[in-house]
Image (cartoon, grey):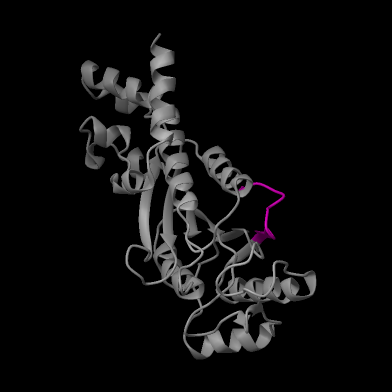
Amino acid sequence: MKNIITLMALVVALALPYSQALAEPALFKTCYDAIGIHASENDSENSGIERSLYVIIDESVGFDANIIGRVADMVVEWSEPGRNIEIFRFSSNVEGRYSEKILEAPYPPEADEDFLDGIKRSMREKLGRCQKQRPMQLRSIIKRKILSTLESADKSIPKSDIVATISELSRYINGKEQERKSVLIVSDMFENSSITSFYSKGSIRMLNAENEIKTMEKNNMMAEFGGADIYVVGLGYFTGNAHATSERYLDPKRRSPIINFWKQYFSKSNGNVVEIGAPLMHGVIK
């Protein structure tokens, strides 16, 4: 009976509307915080997080259900003890669509015996119950945040400040202390800002990757990832939008220079490009 109730609660949680899902607190408390054990009493709460995944979602792209589901599953499967997930949404600086962190979900490893021996039995039991429930709770909130954000995308948003957002968030990511960091960018990767636009006269234009890199450097738009692994889902995803009204297909000839540009951009920004999905990745986040 208890399992049925838990499953029903999970289904309801995943069905929350976009506005309600985003209204939830961005920080998902660890079990230590939830039961009132402070970091000063448990050194492993901080030091136990060795890896972090930063998910950056472009809200100006209307991805299909297959891609939305694949992204959610990929991130959920990456979550395990000793890891932290942070999710950001962005499009451009228009009302309600600016860059924002919508979830931080640390998942510290279970406490060791020495620590458990030093706390009250009642607190130890509360901690055990919380840690038993934690995997399902994390999977639920991570999936809910990703699904609600991707499903609310608006293709009519006038601009898409991809480079500016990546540049800004890269410095935040580089400042984090985790031993290993990975970045997953979910976007069509079609820059459309005051710096440059990949669109021209209702079509995706033929890029010169080297010239575009020079434009980024001239405008101080390069990022700094500090060696983080870079993954992309969605590059070249194209169903037609307000910026490319005269076509419904992006051919490989124009897609290839876009991939080349982003590979150069990430590499010159001290990022380790692992896979760029165009649009889907074939591997997993390691």
Image quarter of residue 236: bottom right
Q: Is residue 17 left or right of residue 269?
A: left
On the image, the x and y values in percent for residue 227 come to: 55, 65
In the image, 205 versus 75, the foreground residue is 205
On the image, the x and y values in percent for residue 232 come to: 61, 59
Residue 8 lies, with reference to residue 275, above or below; the image says above
Is 277 magenta? The answer is yes
Q: Is residue 165 left or right of residue 40?
A: right
Q: Which residue is found at the position 23% from the left and 24% from the top?
A: 119
Is 69 magenta? The answer is no
Q: Is residue 39 left or right of residue 66?
A: left
Q: Which residue is found at the position 37% from the left and 49% from the top?
A: 103
Q: Which residue is found at the position 44% from the left and 70% from the top?
A: 165
Image quarter of residue 205: bottom right
On the image, the x and y values in percent for residue 127 come to: 30, 24
Q: Which residues are magenta?
A: 274-286
On the image, the x and y values in percent for residue 70 come to: 61, 44
The furthest residue to the bottom: 218
What's the magenta bit mostly, secondary-structure-wise? loop
Picture mark count: 0
The furthest residue to the top: 1
Quadrant of the frame with the N terminus: top left
